[in-house]
Image (spheres, rainbow, N blue to C red):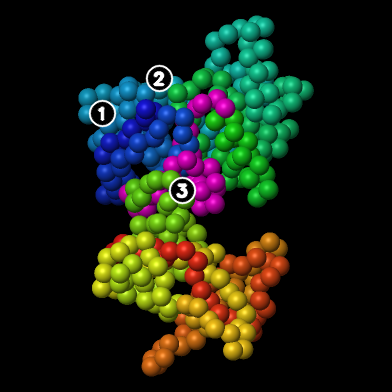
Amino acid sequence: MNALELHSICKSYGAHRALENISLVVPTGSRTVIVGPSGSGKTTLLRMIAGFEFPDRGCVTLNGQTLVDDTHEVPAHQRQIGYVPQDGALFPHMTVAANIGFGLTSKGRRKHERIAVLMDSVALDANMANRWPHELSGGQQQRVALARALAQQPRLMLLDEPFSALDTGLRASMRKLVARLLADAGVTTILVTHDQSEALSFADQLAVMRDGQLVQSGHPLDLYRYPGDEQTALFLGDAVVMPARIEAGWAHCDLGRIPVNNHRNNRCAQIMLRPEQLQLVGIVPNAVESSGCRGVVSERDFSGNTCTLIVELEALPDTDQPGRSLMVRSTGLYAPPAGSAVHVSALGHAHVLNEP
């Protein structure tokens, strides 16, 4: 069963088309991440779902109830949708307990018990109930905002870049905490972010937006491995893209002969490999080399457990063109030093990108 369905959502501000024909299905209990660069329309789409703005055209349904269509619009306060903004937006004149309990209909002991349960669910100590928002860390403020949203027992939770103001280490731990809390509560969730690693980590379903359009959606691993075009490939992570001739399930390119996931024959295309698919081996004199090519490590960026290398490939025979530069991701402990002569080969299949 699907919790949320968007059909042909369009929105313009004057001559600017912010959203163009957006259709998306969000399964019940899932975590969908809408990701895209600044100005791609992702926050506008989230505001349409929340009811803060209304589309010029299109339909929004939640658990079978129509929220927006050509005949009526359900206002935000009647949608039973939780919303956590980027800064948490806590009421500064209210304590933690008062913020979480804002809007609860229960009173007295029942309300106090409900607030205590919510605080425990987001890993907030009970002794923090009487603190003020300015006395909390960024991560604590976000947990209070999440508890306040959960207090309303929403049918859908919207998270608008809630981790962007946190430092790197805290972002990762908060992301895991929030994902676990929402999964345990069975709440369908939509997260908006421009952070690719955050999107890939958090999502069950990933939706990539660009220039007001939904360019691709699906499982995060599928989008990472099989992006529709070069722009999407590079947005979701580092990528090695090169021209190739496709024939009988193989790509003939600067790296030699590589199997591909597309069997269209006798055509030129762009293929993509992720840097972690490239394998480097030191050149051993008189050794028999398998498919691949030779190169020299020109740059080495060590970052602990991983190391990013730039490898200059040898020029192809019978050509005046210099060899291609490739980015390779290796384990930090065993990465070859700059200046090393290496043999480069590819692991797995290359992905054939769609034509522009």
Residue that protrudes farthest toward the right in the picture: 127
Q: Nearer the viewer, mark 3 or mark 2?
A: 3
Q: Is residue 299 magenta?
A: no
The residue lying toward the viewer, choosing from 102 and 190, is 190
Q: Is residue 208 above or below residue 153?
A: below
| Residue type at numbered disc 2 | Gln
Q: Is residue 205 magenta?
A: yes
Q: Is residue 221 above or below residue 178?
A: below
Residue matched to label 1: 69
Disc 2 on helix, strand or loop? helix
The residue lying toward the viewer, choosing from 56 and 117, is 117
Q: Which residues are magenta?
A: 184-213
Q: Is residue 131 above or below residue 337?
A: above
Which numbered tag is attached to residue 220?
3
Question: Mark 3 or mark 1, which has the lower sequence index?
Answer: 1
Query: Measuring 47% from the left and 63% from the top, which residue is drawn there?
Result: 348
Res. 51 in view = no
Residue 121 rendering spot, x and y as whole percentages: 64, 25
Q: Report the quarter where the C terminus lies.
A: bottom left
Residue 296 rendering spot, x and y as whole percentages: 58, 83
Query: Measuring 61% from the left and 18% from the top, which residue is drawn there?
Result: 101
Distance of label 3 from label 2 (alpha carbons): 32 Å
| Residue type at numbered disc 3 | Pro
Q: Report the quarter where the N terminus lies.
A: top left
Res. 2 in view = yes
Residue matched to label 2: 78
Query: Which quadrant of the view contains residue 231?
Result: bottom left
